[in-house]
Image (spheres, grey):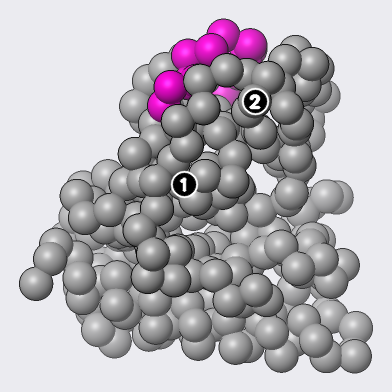
């Protein structure tokens, strides 16, 4: 058995179960029940339902593990293993019936991503990785591109729901990079943005003020596909830092040179 094979299998299975619920709610004609965590941060009853489904499934198989979810109170475990879950990464897309959102499930061991699964249920794309065993999309091994020049590079970014005017808001980074590259996309789900880099659909992704449940699974998938993930400053603590840059590796420092440092999020 390869490292974390059972954990990946459980996460893949529960991600597909969650995806079934998401498809049903996404395609329903009834309006979704939406509340606001903040002025620009939405949560639906589906987020809470799916998060509970995932937490319950994981805790049954791994009862000693901690679990942290975006929407509900977590579960405190007894060791150094913690699952981080985003039941709908891209809730605004989900609410607006834009088919770009995902279930994201990551496993941290002593604070380091060890396994991750990201699933887009609308187009049935299931990404997964375990530390040291590669990254996969629907069973096909992934590898980042070898593009070295910015004019041939597709890059992705996002504008996190934290938009305090006292903090850098990413517009300066966008303005600096956009003229240099083939194109910039803003798609609205960081886990899938990271997976796009891993799958060779883009060469880089950057964003500010994300949370571990946004990036743990996707960041590991990039690394296992041969890419590089750091903070804007080039440090390795991207999981908990206020900035993240993921790339195919060869254009990493070139992109990083255009990114302004961010102050810590409150």
24 in relation to 67, above or below = below
From the viewer's perspective, tell me whether residue 108 is left or right of residue 3.
right
Q: x and y percent of residue 196 in the render?
A: 56, 49
| Marking on residue 54 | none
Mark 2 or 1, nearer chain start = 2
Q: x and y percent of residue 260 in the render?
A: 63, 12
The C terminus is located in which quarter? top right
The residue at 60%/69% (across/down) is: 120
Q: 10 Å neighbourhood of mark 1: few (<14), some, or many (≥20)?
A: many
Q: Is residue 77 visible?
A: yes
The residue tagged 1 is 198
From the viewer's perspective, tell me whether residue 213 is left or right of residue 59.
right
From the viewer's perspective, tell me whether residue 2 is left or right of residue 19.
left
Q: x and y percent of residue 25 in the render?
A: 75, 86
Give the magenta part as a residue range: 249-266
Q: 10 Å neighbourhood of mark 2: few (<14), some, or many (≥20)?
A: few
């Amino acid at each position: 058995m390869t490292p974390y094979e059972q954990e990946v299998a459980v996460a893949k299975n529960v991600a597909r179960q969650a995806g079934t619920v998401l498809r049903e709610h996404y395609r329903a004609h009834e309006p979704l029940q939406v509340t606001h965590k903040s002025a620009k941060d939405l949560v639906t009853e589906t987020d809470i339902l799916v998060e509970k489904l995932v937490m319950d499934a994981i805790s049954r198989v791994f009862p000693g593990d901690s679990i942290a979810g975006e929407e509900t109170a977590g579960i405190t475990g007894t060791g150094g293993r913690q699952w981080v879950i985003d039941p709908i990464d891209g809730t605004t897309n989900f609410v607006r019936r834009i088919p770009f959102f995902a279930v994201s499930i990551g496993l941290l061991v002593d604070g380091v991503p060890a396994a991750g699964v990201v699933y887009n249920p609308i187009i049935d794309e299931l990404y997964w990785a375990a530390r040291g065993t590669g990254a996969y999309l629907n069973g096909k091994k992934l590898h980042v591109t070898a593009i070295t020049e910015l004019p041939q590079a597709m890059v992705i970014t996002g504008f996190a729901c934290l938009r305090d005017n006292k903090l850098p808001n990413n517009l300066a980074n966008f303005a600096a990079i956009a003229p240099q590259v083939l194109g910039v996309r803003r798609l609205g789900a960081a886990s899938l943005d990271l997976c796009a880099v891993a799958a060779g659909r883009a060469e880089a992704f950057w964003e500010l003020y994300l949370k571990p449940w946004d990036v743990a699974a996707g960041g590991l998938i990039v690394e296992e596909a041969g890419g590089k993930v750091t903070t804007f400053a080039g440090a390795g603590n991207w999981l908990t830092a206020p900035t993240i840059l993921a790339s195919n590796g060869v254009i990493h420092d070139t992109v990083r040179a255009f990114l302004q440092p961010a102050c810590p999020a409150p």
